[in-house]
Every structure is written in structure tokens, then in C-alpha cells.
Image (spheres, grey):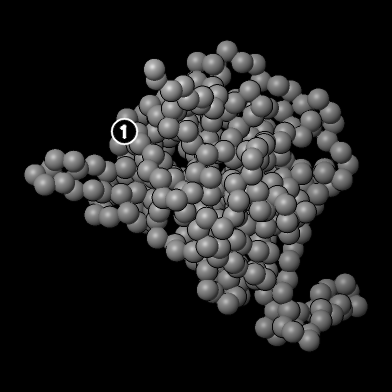
Amino acid sequence: MCAHHDHPTPPLTLDDVARLDDIPAEEKTPDEVRAGLSTARATVTVPPGEKLRQAGDGTLILPEGSFYGRPMAETTLHKRGSLRNPDTPPPPYRPPWQPLLHYPRTTRSQPRTLRRINGRTVVPLEGGHVYGEYPPRQTYFPSGYPWTCIGRVLVWQDAGSASFDWSGTAALVGKRAVLTASHMVPWGAPNGAMQFVAGYFDGSSSVGQGGQSWATTAHGYAGQEVTAHDMAVVRLADPLGDWLGFMGTKPFDSSWQGGAYWTSVGYPGAVSDQRPSFQSGIHVIDDDEDGDGQELEHHADETPGDSGGPFFAGWSDGPYAVGTVAGYEVVSGPLGIGSEDNNISAGGPALGGLVGFARANWT
């Protein structure tokens, strides 16, 4: 007699989603949320012991050494396996004033043809692979839930620098928490900074001037090589998740292999780093476990700028990310036997551990 193993409910297929109607907002946006999203907030850091002064005409006078931005107060690396995965996967949240859109509103601009970039090992998305197995990535205007929960993340090694050093993608997974790749975080930089812009589109947030927030804290897993643990959560100064909603997270189940459920979203420069682009109907080829982490191997088209983007699908209660875009690998076998190359998203119970930690501690 064969043992019976129960598997979690699989995500909705594209055919399932095509039969669903979008859900309009049930309530008006509260005044405090409207004010938070419409109000621009300028953050200025002044040297210790110094203060801002105001001239008679109301002009602010900045002490020497001041700069626009906010360095992170803390970056913490956790030992792999040290964060407990919640018994119940962290659920998604859609505010009643946010409409649910199953598909984003695509823009008229067509994505450029992506170049193939070869590599020899698992590396961060300084390269990446384009396979052409799915319809080309399409840019879209971020509107409604969950599309405004995804945004561009800008990273400074020195918060006092005039421009950021690199950028990628992140997604809201809690009231003040965004999920991204660990290699996006400026670990070890004494004055590092990160800024998340929800629904970044053509240089600003699609939800208003207040749809951006500086990071105060980052937590991830020790060891930043691209593996099953290349993930981090970042605490925001502002509760964007309360205003816009956030995704849930859950570990990938092997019974879902081969199912064309998944969507990848990011800001790859090869398509447009000024507009988000997405690709759907992706299937996972294989999932390799590394302790409580997973490497989800697939052939979505992903290149620099996609790093940290959510790899997600929809269930009856909303969208759940099963991974965050991490990197790519090339495995060479003798005479080509066993050779493979894949893009990789990092996930597994480790993902739930990080998100559970963020939700429990970042109010």
C-alpha cells in the first residue's frame, strides 16, 4: 500500500484567473492614508550635535555636512535556520480602499529585446538569462492591488552620495516590511542607505508623492552568495503596507513543479528600469533544498534590475510570494551531459522565517 501524502492547495492557473472579475474598492480611502500618500516627505540628515536653522523668510539653513537621505541604523545577518517559520504562512492583506486587479494595466511602450548573458556559476543578477520560452516581458502602469505593492529599491553605500550605487526590486510583505534579495543590501557599509519607491513609474511613485520611504533596518541571512538564502527584509520608516496592502509568503511545494502558475516582476534595465515589467505563466523546473531555504529554478527572463523582485502567484485569498529573484546558474556536465542553466529565486521556510520576524517586530 502506498502512503498518502497531502499537498498544499496549488495556486490559481492563468485560466482560473482569467475567469475572475476584478474586485473594486469597497471603501473610500481614509483621510490619513490619502494624506500620507499625497504628501512629500523630505528626510535630511545633519551631523551629530548640529540642528537645522530657519531664516527669516522661512528658508531652512543646513549645517555643513548635511545631506538628503537617511542612513540605516541597523543591518543584521541571521544564522541560517535560526528564524522559525510560522505555522501559518504570513497572509496577504488588501485594504478595502484598494481595488484588486488580477492583471496589471500594460503600457504601450514595447520592451526592448533582451540580450543573453553567459556565466559559469551561481552569481547575483549582475548577469542573468533570457530564454524566450514565454511571451516577452511587458511594461505596465502600477495601479491597484497588488501591483502598487511592488516597487523599485535604490541603494547607497554612502548615504551622503549624490546618487545611488545600484538598484533593484522589492515588494511589500508587511506594514513596514519589504522583501528583497540579500545581495541588494549594503551589508557592512557604515553609512549605507536604501529607499523603496512603491509603484515606481517614470521617476516617481504611481500612488503619490508619499509613496516612498527610507529604510531604517535590514535583516537577512549570513552568507550573501546566491543560494537558497539570498533574501532580506527591510524595515521602512513609513507604514506603506497599511496604506497599499502587502503580499503573503509561503514555501514552495514540490507538487507544484511544472505548473505554469508564477509571475515575476522587476525593473530590469534591459527592458526599462523606469517602468516595471512582468512575465506570467512561468513554471518551476526544479527546487533544490538547502536547509530551510530553497532554490527555485526556472526560465523566466530575468536580468540586472530584477534582483529582489517577487516570484508569486494568486490563491483564493490573495497573492503569495514563494521566492525573491536572486540570480542565475550555469552547470556544465561532461560532454554536455547534465548541463543546465537556470534563473533562480530564493525561497522556502526561510522566507517565512524572515517575514514572520518582520511582522512580529516591526509595528
At 46% across and 21% down in the image, what residue appears?
4
- Residue in front for this viewpoint, 242 or 25: 242
Query: Which three-letter amino acid code belongs to the residue tagged 1?
Result: Gly
Please give left or right for residue 152 compared with residue 44 in the image. Answer: left
Outermost residue, left side = 335
Which quarter of the rendering shows the C terminus?
A: bottom right
- Residue where numbered disc 1 is placed: 132
Q: What SS does tag 1 mark?
A: loop
Which quarter of the rendering shows the N terminus?
A: top left
Outermost residue, right side = 56
Crowd rating for badge 1 (residues with CA inside 10 Å; few <14, some 14–19, many 20+): few
At 47% across and 54% down in the image, what residue appears?
229
Outermost residue, front side = 1
Please give left or right for residue 182 compared with residue 206 in the image. Answer: left
On screen, residue 146 above or below 304: above
- Residue in front for this viewpoint, 42 or 288: 288
On screen, residue 348 above or below 63: above
Asked if residue 212 shows in the view, the reply is no
- Residue in front for this viewpoint, 113 or 296: 296
Q: Position of residue 233 (x, y in %)?
A: 60, 55
- Residue in front for this viewpoint, 170 or 28: 170
Q: Position of residue 130 (x, y in %)?
A: 32, 40
Residue 16 in which image quadrant:
top right
Q: Position of residue 133 (x, y in %)?
A: 32, 30
Asked if residue 64 shows in the view, the reply is yes
